[in-house]
Amino acid sequence: MSVSTHDLYVHATDAPLWQVPASGSARFSWEYDDGRDRLLALYQKGKDKQWDGQRRIDWELEVDPYDPLGTPDEAMTLYGTRYWDKMNEAERGELRRHYASWQFSQFLHGEQGAMVCAARIVESVPDMDAKFYSATQTMDEARHAEIYGRFLHEKVGMLYPVNDNLQSLLGDTLRDSRWDMPYLGMQVLIEGLALAAFGMIRDTTDKPLPQQILAYVMQDEARHVAFGRMALRDYYKQLTDAELREREEFVIEGCYLMRDRLKGAEVLENFGIPRAEADVFSEQSEYLQLFRKLLFSRIVPCVRDIGLWGERLQRAYLDMGVFEMGNQNLDLLMAQDEQIAEKLDAERFAAEEAERTAEVAEAIEEGRALP
């Protein structure tokens, strides 16, 4: 019998549904013939690259719920504190489980938000080529939410509610009536930060199942960020300075929210650590300091690329210590995401082919041995 998701949350959520009032207009276009070549090519790629999460991912792979990601001790926020020293191995395993649950739960909630935002873009964007691509992204995000939900249900057995700051940014993005804001809030900020988080775990975990999940999701997300860059770069060239500054203010506020989202203090609270102390541990953790900084490696160059690079925004990035991220080569990062997923596919298919060949050879030998 299936288990309700609400039974797996570490504590009760406020309500079974979160309702965000819709704003803005639904826009129909009667122009079906012409479109931007780059965007239509991305739409074609989005169709070609659709995949089935039930089949492409090897769900038979075992996962230790008390070490789902192979997290080293040094990466744990409590490492080196008196709380860590008092913990036995079972308690440290439980802490690893909670952190993995917290991370993947936020991925799951973010993917649902991305699905809703992509559907909102289909509704509100004025250009048909953008509507076409957003429809493929809506399906991508549904698949991602399905996969993260399955991993948490079947392999970890625990979920965390949506983080307050992530929920706040999702709400701000969806409540804004301007059609470009779901692009900016989701495609640039939330997706950009998620890509960097996925990449850090993908590149450091030695566990095959989460590695597969993250590699294949990132292959899709690389297209999504490219879509946001194309659409916003074209549109923002038409805006006034005042309109650009409004969007920069949204980016600044969103980036501070996302930075503050990454403390994971709610995990430590579940282990009896007061919130103020949990915040201090999170701020002092060398691993989390590096993690927070690298998470902006996709956002800052994208913001700069689409034409939002005013003085106040630059000062905010200096304050966050991520200004130099603006020089990252986004195209190279996206190409690497594609290559990693394709390499993983090739390795898996080669291993499966070798296994089938061995089975056939074994059957032949058994046949020869018969009288």
Image (spheres, helix red, strand yellow):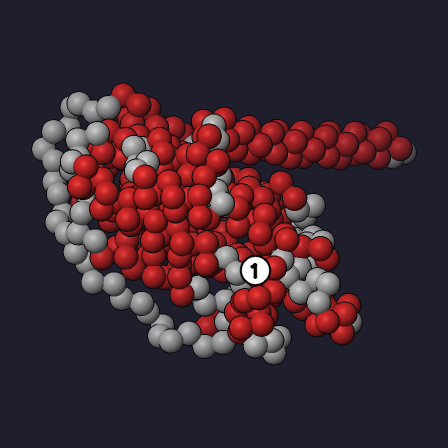
Q: Which residue is mark 1?
A: 283
Q: Is residue 236 left or right of residue 110?
A: left
- Please name the residue shown 19% across and 58% down the image: 22
Task: Give the class, few, some or many, for how many residues have Cα within 10 Å of label 1's Cα (few <14, many ≥20).
Answer: some
Q: Could you tell me residue 348's position as x and y percent? A: 64, 35
- Residue 262 position (above or below residue 127): below
**Residue farthest toward the left in the current orientation of the protein:** 30
Q: Position of residue 135 (x, y in %)?
A: 29, 41
Question: Which residue is pictured at 23% across the width and 43% down the height?
Answer: 245
Q: Residue at x 73, y 34 (%)?
A: 355
Query: Which x, y percent locates residue 208?
Result: 66, 45
Residue name at image x 58 percent, y 44 percent:
200
Q: Quadrant of the C terminus?
A: top right
Q: Is residue 49 above or below residue 267?
A: above
**Among all residues in the image, which is located at the extreme top?**
37
In depth, the one of 103 and 130 nearer the eye is: 103
Residue 2 visible to the viewer: no
Residue 150 drawn at (x, y percent): 52, 57
**Image quarter for residue 314?**
top left
The amino acid on which the numbered mark 1 sits, given as a three-letter code, is Glu
- 371 vs 37: above or below: below
Residue 177 seen in the current view: yes
Q: Is residue 270 left or right of residue 248?
A: right
Q: How many marks are shown on the rendered structure?
A: 1
Compare residues 19 and 77 and report the one nearer the observer.
Answer: 77
In terms of secondary structure, where does tag 1 sit?
Answer: helix
